[in-house]
């Protein structure tokens, strides 16, 4: 069992009359990393938080058990690189208050991989954003997720009330939000990820696409 996670600061903008829900978020500090997807869908690299995003270990039992703060913000994006044409996976973890207070001295772990496979893990401020979301009980590299993305995109275009934001590659900026994962933090950084088991139909993951912000 883990403590309740910090509530994600987002506002529901619409979704009562559409098959998707539109949210708006303020800017937030995230822990970000990028991995080149060298194994494709079969490798399932997007289903486990990369090891170098951990910066400490947590003691959860015994007389030296540590108190920690849980955060539910776990996002995965799979995109195409403009220069190479290869796919890469990005991970972004919301940093809770305990991580913010210690970020100046925080160091992320090291991982023994080639530079052309893995980029450094960094802290960054993700700007305010607007996005549309639909529920999806599968994983970010399922074959079926392509149809979910397509229906979401086509539904937004058909409705005409929102404009999909495009990335540098000219494609919609999709991302996947895990609802069964909690990252656990202490002043030393992120030390544990807890994956909650839920039966299919109750996982509540989200497939999302970024929208243009209203002026």
Image (cartoon, helix red, strand yellow):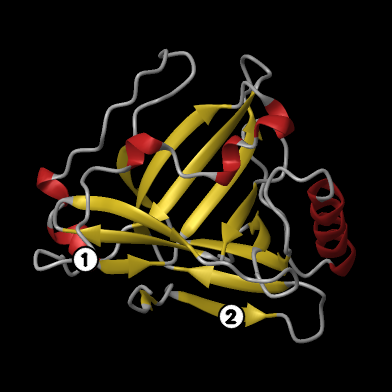
Question: Which of the 4 image quarters holds residue 202?
Answer: bottom right
Residue nearest the viewer, comparing 74 with 2: 2
Mark earlier in primary sequence (1, 2)? 2
Question: Which of the 4 image quarters holds residue 153?
Answer: bottom right
Q: In this view, does 187 lie to the left or right of 112?
A: left
- C-alpha gap between disc 1 and disc 2: 38 Å
The location of residue 194, given as percent across then percent down, is 42, 60
The location of residue 132, given as percent across then percent down, is 68, 65
Indicate which disc residue 61 carries.
1
| Quadrant containing the C terminus in the rendered view | bottom right
- Residue lying farthest front? 62
Question: Which residue position holds label 2?
Answer: 12
Residue density around tag 2, few if under 14, some if 14–19, many if 20 or more, within 10 Å: few
Residue occupying image coordinates x 26% and y 69%: 69
Foreground: disc 1 or disc 2: 1
The location of residue 105, given as percent across then percent down, is 10, 44
Q: Is residue 17 left or right of residue 137?
A: right
Residue occupying image coordinates x 41% and y 53%: 93
Residue occupying image coordinates x 66% and y 72%: 22
Relative to 161, is 141 above or below? above
The location of residue 64, given as percent across then percent down, is 9, 64
Relative to 100, is 38 above or below? above
């Amino acid at each position: 069992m883990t403590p309740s996670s910090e509530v994600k600061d987002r506002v529901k903008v619409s979704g009562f009359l559409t098959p998707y829900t539109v949210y708006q978020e303020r800017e937030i500090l995230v822990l970000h990393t990028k991995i080149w997807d060298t194994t494709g869908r079969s490798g399932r690299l997007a289903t486990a938080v990369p090891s170098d995003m951990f910066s400490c270990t947590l003691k959860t039992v015994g007389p030296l058990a540590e108190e920690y703060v849980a955060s539910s913000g776990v996002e995965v994006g799979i995109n195409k690189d403009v220069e190479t044409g290869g796919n890469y996976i990005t991970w972004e973890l919301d940093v809770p208050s305990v991580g913010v207070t210690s970020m100046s001295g925080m160091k992320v772990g090291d991982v023994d991989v080639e530079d052309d496979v893995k980029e450094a893990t960094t802290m960054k401020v993700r700007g305010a954003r607007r996005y549309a979301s639909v529920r999806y009980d599968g994983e970010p590299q399922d074959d079926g997720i392509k149809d979910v993305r397509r229906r979401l995109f086509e539904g937004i275009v058909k409705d005409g009330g929102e404009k999909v934001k495009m990335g540098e590659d000219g494609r919609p900026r999709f991302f996947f939000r895990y609802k069964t994962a909690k990252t656990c933090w202490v002043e030393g950084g992120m030390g544990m990820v807890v994956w909650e088991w839920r039966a299919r139909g109750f996982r509540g993951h989200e497939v999302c696409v970024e929208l243009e912000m209203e002026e």
